[in-house]
Amino acid sequence: MLPQAAEPPWAFGDAGGADPVGAFEHRFRAAGGEVVRLTGEAVARGWLDDFAGEFETVSVCTGVPDALQPALPPAPPSQAALGVSLAVGAAAQTGSLLLSSREGRQPQLLPPVHLIWVRAREVRPTLGGALQAHRENLPAVLALHSGPSKSADIGQILVTGVHGPGRVIAAILGADA
C-alpha cells in the first residue's frame, strides 16, 4: 500500500487566507520556481549583488527600477545569461506572476535564468483579484509565469527550459524575510 501524500497547507481553491504571500510561495516552489523574500529595496540590492555574481551578462525589461538592476554588462535577450523583469502582480491561488508586455517579452523568455521582482502588496489571493487590480490599465499581453518552462511533448518525458527559462526566481519585495 502506498503512503498517502501530505496535504499542502493550502488546498487549490483556498488562496492562503491571511497569508497570500505564503500561499504564492508554496505554489510557485511546487511548480519548480525559486522564491526569495526581501524586506525592502536596500536588502534587495545586497542580495542582488551576491546573486548576480554567478552571471556574465543581463537583459533587463524596461520597467525595472535602477536600484533593482544587476551591475552586469547588458546583452541582447537571446545572448544574455540572466533576464530581469518586474511583475505587475501575482496570484497566490495559482502561484502565478503577472508580467506585462509593456516591459518587453524577450528578456522574460529568452535568457536561461529569469529573475522576477514582485512587491508583496501586489500578491493577491486569487487570479481574478490579481487581474481585477489591473483591469483599468491592461497591456496588450499579460503573461502568467508559474515557474520554469516545462514540456513533455516528446515521449511524455518532462524537460525543463525548452520553451523559456529553465530557472525562474521570484524575488518578493516588502515581505517578511
Image (spheres, helix red, strand yellow):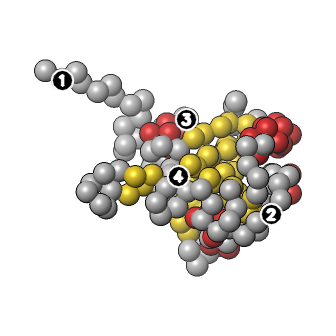
Dot 1 surroundings within 10 Å: few (below 14), some, or many (20 or more)?
Answer: few
> Which quarter shows the C terminus?
top right
Q: Which residue bears the numbered disc 3?
A: 22
Determine the residue positioned at 58% across, 49% down: 168
Depth check: give the residue in front, 175 or 171.
Answer: 171
Q: Is mark 3 on a helix, strand or loop?
A: helix
Determine the residue positioned at 44% across, 39% down: 30
Depth check: give the residue in front, 10 or 85.
Answer: 85
Q: Distance between the residues labelled 2 and 4?
A: 20 Å
Amino acid bearing label 4: Gly
Percent across and percent down for residue 29 are 50, 39
Q: Which residue bears the numbered disc 2?
A: 74
> Of callouts 2 and 4, which one flags the residue occurring earlier in the amino acid sequence?
2
Amino acid bearing label 2: Pro
Q: Which residue bears the numbered disc 1?
A: 2
Q: Which of marks 3 and 4 is in front?
A: 4
Dot 2 surroundings within 10 Å: few (below 14), some, or many (20 or more)?
Answer: some
